Amino acid sequence: MECTVRWTGPSGMTFLAETGSGHVVAMDGAPDGGGRDLAPRPMEMVLAGTGGCTAYDVVLILKRGRQDVRGCDVTLKAERAETDPKVFTKVNFHFTVRGRNLKPAQVERAVQLSHEKYCSASVMLEKTAELTYSFEVIDDFTDAAPQT
């Protein structure tokens, strides 16, 4: 895996990251640090990447378990250390999983497997942060005919 991060120039603190797969992501700093608030902060990207990693796992595990999953959101709320390096010290993951006749036990197991075995990002974060998880299951009837 490879990534190149390039500072865009002397008029701010914007950086462009080009991933090994050829995708580009912008990052910027807060105005009090010379940034112009044009893009997510680098640490927000770490949090977003962790959310993407674990949500991917949960959906894949549920699909492989023949669950009719139709949506998966994960909201991450993090706290950081007050002194440098300002690592994450606490992160809560709340999953909202939508589908038809989803079994809560399977959703719970998918979340657990992601965090204990498959999500490399959360396993790394666990080295500095206390990780907590919660989930809710919503039965999805979006294909049903409208009620009159």
Image (cartoon, rainbow, N blue to C red):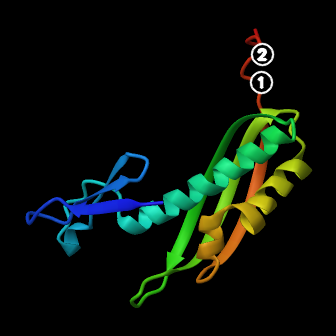
Q: Residue at x 64, y 77 (%)?
A: 126
Q: Residues within 10 Å of mark 2 (few under 14, many from 20)?
A: few
The C terminus lies in quadrant? top right
Name the one closer to the observer, 127 or 75. 127
Residue 115, horizontal then vertical, whole percent? 73, 65
* Nearer to me, 29 or 15: 15
Query: Where is residue 141, by image quadrant?
Result: top right
- Residue in the image at 59% along x and 74% along y: 125
Query: At numbered mark 1, what does the secondary structure look like: helix, strand or loop?
Result: loop
The answer to which quarter of the image holds residue 38 is bottom left
Mark pair 1, 2: CA separation: 5 Å
Q: Which mark is residue 141?
A: 1
Identify residue type, mark 1.
Phe
Residue 73 coordinates in the image, percent (x, y): 63, 46
How many neighbours does mark 1 have within 10 angstroms: few (below 14), some (14-19), or many (20 or more)?
few
- As drawn, is 110 to the left or to the right of 48? right
**Which numbered marker is on residue 120?**
none
Q: Mark 2 sits on what residue?
A: 144
Q: Are marks 1 and 2 in contact (CB under 8 Å)?
A: yes
As displayed, is residue 69 above or below residue 38?
Answer: above
Write the residue at 35% across / 58% down. 40
Height in image: 75 above or below 132?
above
Label tally = 2
Residue shown at 60%/74% (left/top)?
A: 124
Horizontally, is 34 left or right of 68 in the view?
Answer: left
Instruction: State the image quarter where residue 59 is shown.
Output: top right
Identify residue type, mark 2.
Ala
In the image, is residue 96 above or below residue 10?
above
In the rendered image, residue 117, in percent from the top left (x then y), is placed at 76, 65
Classify mark 2: helix, strand or loop: loop
